[in-house]
Amino acid sequence: MESHMRMEQYLTHTDYALWEVIVNGDAPVVASASAEGPIPLKTAEQKLARKNELKAKSTLLLAIPDEHLLKFHGIKDAKTL
């Protein structure tokens, strides 16, 4: 719990948008290729949401001790992590 409070304090101070991604799960909708055609181009908003999601997840993974990192590495989004 103490590490959660430290992480929250750090992120709300340095980059509040990342903390919002972690709390709210601001993961973008991922388009997939289908028989109908190629993957549509992403909007600037989708690119920013994806960037924020990756940055938030990476920041959280940095806080996990090395011996536990493999347990959490496969988690897909920052909110779940």
Image (cartoon, rainbow, N blue to C red):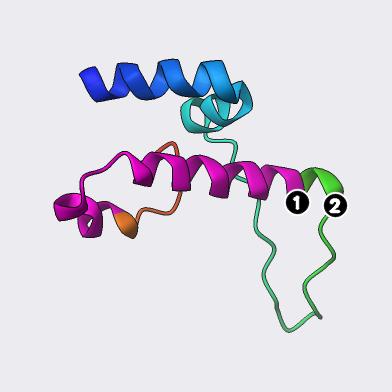
Q: Secondary structure at mark 1?
A: helix
Give the main secondary structure of the magenta stretch.
helix
Up/down of 61 relative to 74, above or below: above
Determine which residue is flagged by label 2: 43
Say whether residue 26 is left or right of residue 80: right
| Residue for point 73% across, 84% down | 35
> Would you say residue 1 is visible in this rendering?
no
Up/down of 16 relative to 67, above or below: above
Amino acid residing under circle 2: Thr
Amino acid residing under circle 1: Lys
Q: Are marks 2 and 1 in contact (CB under 8 Å)?
A: yes
Label 1 Cα neighbours within 10 Å, binned few <14 / some 14-19 / many ≥20: few
Instruction: Report the magenta residues as a range.
Output: 47-72
- Of residues 15 and 32, which is closer to you in this image? 15
| Residue for point 26% across, 43% down | 64
Determine which residue is flagged by label 1: 47
Q: Residue 35: which disc?
A: none
| Residue for point 70% across, 78% down | 34
Say whether residue 66 is left or right of residue 75: left
Most extreme residue toward the bottom, as rendered? 35
